[in-house]
């Protein structure tokens, strides 16, 4: 059976594994501080156009960060999300432009490819007990190669062939893709904090052996989180294609690092067992505001990378201090 300490860690009412409201306020305060800082440094930053543009740029990263959160909470990692997104967007573009498939069928095919990639990641990980780092690193290369093959190593222009998914709505200025991404965030948070599967995900990330000894097979849980991650990568491919109106086989390179950075900034532990989808979304916003603000003030690309990397390292250090404080509280 689960030990008392393990049972406490996966209880819905427990706040040591589920971020408290104060944690959300802290991330929101960092976000507001960045907005205020860049507003002072640039007179053009604080505008409705800036924020709607940012919102319409992040749907793909947002849904991928949702899947990455679930994987990291289960003590895994998925390095293939950027390549899978590129493959899925290429499949969608070719299905619409070359094969002339109806939009719903093309989107279903795109999502199916993402789901299949996620299932393969999860199956190989649990079947042969291989670290997910290695498995998804291999899938990163496989999916990238598939993206080149599908698109014939060139960009495929689709124009309005995938509808108005990425087109801002007239009054609010936000695209349907962003609204769907928000729905994915809400659904992911409910799954993680209010469902049996979510409790199992946290438990597996906290102590997989204790879960196994309690009579629960952790392998289907691991398979499920990788399948969800792959499916959301496919959805990210839809959003990415809708925003750019073309499929580029080189798209998504390094996106897995941005997703991991956003999730870690949001407070999800790299050791597993703790995380929040809402916090990851706030991490996505922090990354987006930071990069847009640095571009607005004229920072060079090397400078933007240095600052973003420093923020990620600071977030990891903060997570380490938070984890040690939690361990001390549990001992006391």
Image: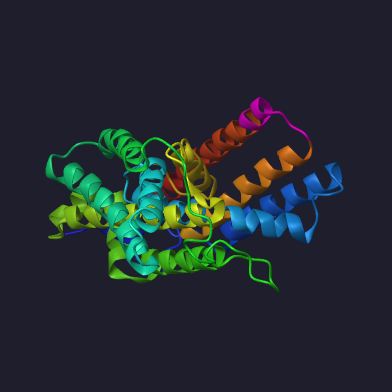
Residue under the point 57% across and 57% down: 23
Q: How many marks?
A: 0
Q: From the viewer's perspective, is 32 left or right of 234?
A: right
Furthest residue in direction bottom, as rendered: 171
Up/down of 14 relative to 29, above or below:
below
Q: Position of residue 273 (x, y in %)?
A: 36, 51
Q: From the viewer's perspective, is 25 left or right of 231?
A: right
Residue under the point 19% across and 36% down: 130
Q: Position of residue 24 (x, y in %)?
A: 58, 59
Q: From the viewer's perspective, is 168 left or right of 233?
A: right
Q: Position of residue 166 (x, y in %)?
A: 56, 61
The answer to which image quadrant residue 77 occupies is top left
The coloring applied to the image is: rainbow
Furthest residue in direction top, as rendered: 302
Residue under the point 15% across and 57% down: 217
Up/down of 175 relative to 264, above or below:
below
Up/down of 66 relative to 145, above or below:
below
Please check the rendered image and state whether residue 220 is part of the magenta-colored stretch, yes or no. Answer: no
Quadrant where the N terminus sits is: bottom left
Up/down of 121 relative to 223, above or below:
above
Which of the two residues, 320 or 56, is positioned nearer the viewer here? 56
Q: Is residue 12 visible?
A: no
Numbered range of the magenta stretch: 298-305
Q: Position of residue 121 (x, y in %)?
A: 24, 45
User: Taken as a whole, is the magenta stretch helix, strand or loop?
Assistant: helix
Q: Is residue 318 visible?
A: yes
């Amino acid at each position: 059976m689960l030990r008392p300490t393990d049972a406490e860690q996966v209880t819905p009412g427990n706040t040591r594994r589920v971020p408290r409201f104060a944690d959300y306020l802290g991330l929101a305060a960092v976000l507001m501080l960045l907005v205020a800082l860049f507003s002072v440094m640039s007179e053009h930053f604080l505008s409705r156009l800036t924020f709607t543009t940012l919102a319409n740029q992040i749907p793909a990263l947002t849904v991928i960060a949702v899947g990455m959160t679930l994987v990291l909470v289960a003590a895994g990692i998925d390095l293939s999300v950027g390549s899978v997104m590129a493959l899925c967007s290429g499949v969608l573009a070719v299905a619409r432009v070359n094969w002339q498939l109806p939009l719903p069928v093309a989107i279903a095919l795109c999502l199916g490819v993402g789901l299949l990639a996620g299932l393969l990641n999860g199956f190989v990980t649990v079947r042969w007990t291989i670290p997910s780092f290695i498995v998804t690193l291999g899938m990163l290369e496989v999916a990238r190669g598939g993206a080149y093959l599908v698109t014939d190593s060139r960009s495929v222009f689709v124009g309005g062939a995938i509808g108005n998914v990425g087109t801002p709505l007239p009054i609010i200025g936000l695209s349907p893709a962003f609204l769907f991404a928000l729905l994915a965030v809400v659904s992911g948070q409910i799954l993680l904090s209010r469902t049996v599967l979510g409790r199992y995900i946290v438990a597996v990330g906290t102590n997989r052996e204790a879960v196994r000894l309690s009579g629960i097979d952790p392998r289907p849980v691991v398979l499920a989180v990788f399948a969800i991650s792959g499916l959301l990568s496919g959805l990210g491919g839809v959003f990415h294609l809708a925003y750019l109106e073309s499929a580029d086989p080189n798209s998504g390179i390094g996106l897995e690092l941005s997703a991991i950075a956003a999730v870690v900034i949001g407070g999800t532990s790299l050791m597993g067992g703790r995380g929040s989808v809402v916090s990851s979304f706030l991490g996505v916003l922090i990354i987006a505001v930071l990069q847009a603000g640095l571009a607005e003030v004229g920072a060079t690309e090397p400078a933007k990378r240095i600052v973003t990397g420093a923020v990620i390292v600071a977030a990891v250090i903060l997570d380490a201090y938070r984890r040690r404080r939690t361990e001390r509280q549990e001992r006391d």
